[in-house]
Image (cartoon, grey):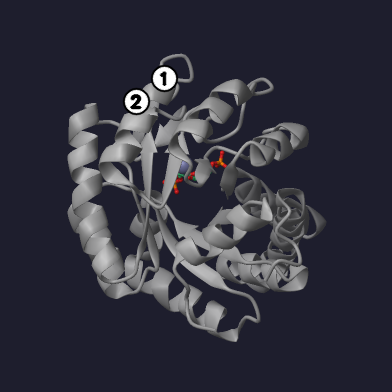
Amino acid sequence: MPLVPMKQLLDKAESGGYAVGAFNCNNMEIVQAIVEAAAAEKAPVIVQASQGAIKYAGIEYIVALTRLAAEQAPVPVALHLDHGTSFAQVMQCIARGFSSVMIDGSKYPLEENIALTKKVLEAARAVGVTVEAELGKIGGTEDDIFVSEKEANYTDPEEARYFVEKTAPDALAIAIGTAHGQYKGEPKLDQERLSLIRSLVKIPIVLHGSSGVPDDAITEAISRGVRKVNIDTNIREAFMGGVKRALAANADEIDPRKALGPAKAAMIEIVREKIRLFGSAGQA
Ligand code: G3H
Ligand code: 13P
Ligand code: ZN
């Protein structure tokens, strides 16, 4: 089926009390793995592209690959811009076919974040595209800017209420102790803060940096209002693990398909596991 707006998937997740997996893609094998895993689990799914993915593959390739995968899939697929950096970039993605965008104004002062988010919302709403905003700084590497885990500041609930009152985005990414990339220790999520924010904003909450977060913390966060869970690092690990195992078995292999085939199979496995964990299996 054609790409669907992410809002459609999040609204259904809201009434069903589960979360939709948002998985980062960078090439054909990753797009295929995400959508094939979703089809196998009969789950709605979000394919998303980061700044790095856009630099690596280009907007047109990402749209073409995901649109084709979605058209062939028996489950609904949304294509989402992850951590959009500017109004111009958001417009380029919408014009080329993304069905959802994130405008990440979290590095700006509050009022600037509000102004940018409102501008994006007005344009995106006019063409039925979903908008995710961000408040608070998620640790790790984001938009090519390194926010140390120490410095990362959590989302302030009162500020979140004010931000959503002024902007009314379709979903809000918050900082409650997760970080992008591999964790050094076990992350500890501020679940109370999540509940407080959710009671004040009443819109779907997005959890970034979810690779490496213990399963019970993820399910608890979903029970408290998280409706979109972002996974990138676990897919990278599965991909490269598959490639490394293939090369360890035959270091002289010259056929890339012999390494990329097992890499894709490993990615399908991890995406299926996450989909079941998020409660979205069988919800398509
Ligand atoms: O935003 C989080 C992504 O995991 C960063 O990925 O290196 O592809 O930009 P990137
Ligand atoms: P991880 O790489 O930690 O899974 O985070 C992904 C993410 O939040 C993308 O926006
Ligand atoms: Zn993120």
Q: Nearer the viewer, residue 272 or 194?
A: 194
Query: In the image, is 40 to the left or to the right of 159?
Result: right
Disc 2 crowd, CA 10 A, few/some/many (<14, 14-19, 20+): some
| Residue at disc 2, secondary structure | helix
Quick check: 279 above or below 264? above
Residue 29 drawn at (x, y percent): 59, 68
Whole-angstrom CA distance, mark 1 to mark 2, is 13 Å
Q: Is residue 132 above or below residue 179?
A: below
In-front residue for pair 184/138:
138
Circles 1 and 2 in contact, beta carbons < 8 Å: no
Q: In the figure, residue 41 lies in which quadrant?
A: bottom right
From the viewer's side, name the closer residue of 194 and 108.
194
Q: Amino acid at mark 2?
A: Glu
Q: Which residue is mark 2?
A: 159
Name the residue type under label 1. Asn
What residue would you read off at disc 1? Answer: 153
Residue nearest the observer in this picture, 284 or 103: 284
Left or right, 94 with respect to 42, comes to left
